[in-house]
Amino acid sequence: MPHARAADGAALHYEIHGAGRPLVLLSGQANDHHWWDAVRDAFAGEFATVVLDYRGTGASDRPDTDTYSTPGFARDVLAVLDHAGIDRAHVYGTSMGGRVAQWIAADHPERVDRLVLGCTSPGAPHGVERGPEIRRALAQPDPAAARRTLLELMYTPGWLSTHRGPFHTLGDPTMPGHARRGHLRASARHDAWQALPRITAPTLVVHGTEDAFNPTANAPLIAARIPGARLHLVPGARHAYFEEFAALATPPVLDFLAARG
């Protein structure tokens, strides 16, 4: 299993699947590369697809330091690309991965061909935050009830009635507490509002219309902030639109990345 080294020496696990032009897939907060398992092969069929474990997750190092931030994760992704010998790539980030992708594209435009931002936010204070009732439900002391809340924010009732898991979008269960808290702080402190207009890569913004975890209203905000960005909404989808609604969401992303439309 290849590991890159971050600037501070942290080991960063990554994998490359498929062949062709490079594509980086970035997962959500507190999740490792398995976030993409259900749809990775569709992308690896057309691209050399890079998936990685953020610091604090999976097979990457889990430093107990104040090194968790979305700009820091962006630097880690660039360290992975450098180690893999990739000068330039498409980048597709979802949820917190979309926040990380914003910094990569804004600060290192020479490294990004095309950019896809899925179910993400520009961050506070300009982004639209989830409601207080959702925050309370996720923070309740009963772990089983909190997990059920998260599942219902990710997937529709119909999907959950026919899919029993395993679910790879609920967080890496092996994460130590300090890393989980670090990821939470990284997302909470994200603010790329002033950086978004600097993005020059062709950009597609994708979001489910029923996403209450990261409210859908963030999608048009981001699309309007990035010059020339396109907006694609997935009807009926919640936060994990890329998995449950893959038949609707993956083809337009593939077409965009391949410049077929």
Image: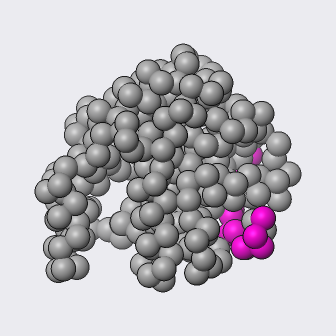
Q: x, y percentage for residue 191?
A: 48, 44
Reply above or below: 159 against 30: above
Is residue 128 shown left or right of residue 78?
A: left
Reply above or below: 222 against 76: above
Reply above or below: 187 against 30: above
Q: x, y percentage for residue 63?
A: 62, 79
Is residue 87 shown left or right of residue 232?
A: right
Give the quarter of the image for residue 43. top right
Reply above or below: 120 against 173: above
Q: x, y percentage for residue 147?
A: 24, 71
Is 192 in front, or is 217? 192
Q: x, y percentage for residue 183?
A: 48, 65
Residue at image position (22%, 79%) is 143
- Quadrant in which the C terminus is drawn: top right
Q: Is residue 255 visible to us here? A: no
> Any magenta on residue 12?
yes
> Any magenta on residue 22?
no
Residue at image position (57%, 34%) is 195
- Quadrant in which the N terminus is drawn: bottom right
Is 128 in front, or is 255? 128
Residue at image position (30%, 40%) is 128
Magenta-drawn segment: 7-19
Give the quarter of the image for residue 197. top right
Residue at image position (42%, 33%) is 206
Pick out the residue farthest to the right.
85
